[in-house]
Image (tube, coloured by chain):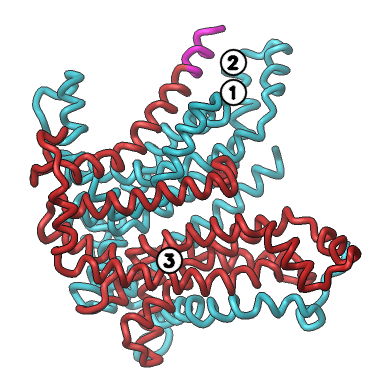
Chain colours: A red, B cyan
Amino acid sequence: MSVAERLARLSMWAAALFTVVFLMTPLLITVAVSLGSSSVFTLPPTDWSLRWYQRLAITRGLLPSLLTSLQVAAFSTAVALALGTLCAIALVRGRFPGRDAIATFLVSPLMLPGLVIGIAMLQGFKTIGLREAFASLLLAHVVITLPYVVRTVFAALSLFDFSLVDAARTLGCSYPTALMRVLVPALGPAFLTSGMFAFLASMDNYPISIFFTDAWTKTLPIQMLQYVEENPDPTIAAISTGLVLLAILALIVGDRLVGLRRMADF
Amino acid sequence: MTKALSPWRDPVALLAAPAVLYLLALYALPLVWLLAKSFSGPAGLTLAPYAEFFADPFNWRVVANTLSIALWVTLVCLLIGYPASFALARAGAALQIAMLVAIILPLSVGVVVKAFAWQIVLRRDGVVSQLLVGLGIWDEPQRLLFTETGLVLGAANIFLPFMILPIYSVVKLIDPRLDEAGATLGATPIYRFLRVTLPLSLPGVVSGVAFVFSMSVSMYVIPSLLIGDRFQTLSTLTGRSFLFMRNEQLGSTTAVILLALAVSIVVGSGRLARRLGGSA
């Protein structure tokens, strides 16, 4: 092996190792800080304690905002799954012009600055007289979650062999039964993973939500950022650790359903 | 091939209608309206807000900040991500799983969580400072929080998966026999890399760079937490003018500039990727 090849190989494995450590750092730091008893982020923690977790319950505004986020995420994901799946079916099965353009349009909210989308929506909602924070959040978050569903279900449907539905009908199933017994199980994994990532995207959204909160209705990221700016202490690390656990759960479920490698498909 | 029917003759098209109409009403229309309003003055069509914006040297500083930070973040992500995506494609099972977990897991954790963690990492007594002092690179601990370097480091960390995954998706399709064939024919490693591997991986690089650059241009939470008000970008200025300064005129102008930047990156990179894909 020549020197250049050795160098290339070395840099490749060094980059791989660095990537793993670098990407895991913020998550590990969060967990470590949340379990330490010090309030000044001493690392490694000198004493272990669960006091920051106990503080979660008494920190004003944190639990209501968690509840708001969960409600908004659940509702918007459910709507996105319904609208997105129907649309993906039309895009895969339909024979009409402009399907590529429609697919790009539906995924485009992921590619544009969230802040700009939020501002545009804020002005739109103001114009039609919608001032209710919770309703605005629900409507806005469907735009955030829809792209995830369309992208993943579209990809799964493109791989699905629709002649299987015909086969089921030949074997005596009615059309709805054939769909239920062949198409639905085949789409299940895509449905669940896209729903999961849509849910997490809604839970995490900051730049759009910030325009639709008021003194009473705040989502979790908004409340967390406000808390960090006012009094940074490991209480935020404790709630963050909860969110990391949620992400680990999503990863395990996703791995079981579609496999890690397919989750990395871009 | 079935001939494309008009939407009016293909009933399946109706299934797309709810989603499309929803996005048209709640997303496309407001964006178009934002755009239209920013160009309309009391006397019809106007460019006055933009002329005013670019007449202020402070705003040029803001644009320069935005672009330079985005360039640095993209460069750091590319330098780490390019070799890392080759490693991911060629790694054995154990390392590949470790890398996939390290890449996918942070994607499902919110940006507020990660930016908060970087606030701790970049402190004077934080991990980076301790590491650099331990390695003898720094003589004494330094604070990286609220510096440009800290911002680039934190943002590169958060956006790195968006560089690795698109490059990986292209690299894993490159046939290793191409490289062997080049070697058999006597090409040097450097020549093989420049003439075979690099051109084949370019479409992935283009889309990774486009992702990371456009996300760095429009990031809002990360600069708010890692550098603060001292350093304004188009995105933070947009947010501030709506949320704190109540200056909707300025906010709309910067929002449209951001939108134009984002759209041109998406369209430009799409074209470039298609041209590279066609010639490869």
Pointer 1 chain: B
Pointer 2 chain: B
Report the residue at 36% width, 46% height from top.
B158
Residue A150: quadrant of the picture: bottom right
Q: Which residue is mark 3?
A: B259
Q: Residues within 10 Å of mark 3 (few under 14, many from 20)?
A: many
Q: Which residue is mark 2?
A: B189
Residue farthest to the front, as pictured = A172
Which percent across, then down, holds residue B90?
57, 26
Pointer 3 chain: B
Tell me the SS state at disc 3: helix
Which percent across, then down, holds residue B39?
41, 80
Mark pair 1, 3: CA separation: 37 Å
Please say if B243 is above or below B157.
Answer: below
Q: Are marks 2 and 3 on the same chain?
A: yes
| Cβ–Cβ under 8 Å for marks 1 and 2 | yes
Magenta stretch: includes residue A4: yes
Q: Which residue is mark 1?
A: B193
- Under mark 3, the amino acid is Leu
Tell me the SS state at disc 2: helix
Which percent across, then down, holds residue A250?
45, 51
Given residues A154 and A190, the one toward you in this image is A190
Residue A209: quadrant of the picture: bottom left
Which percent across, then down, holds residue B146?
17, 47
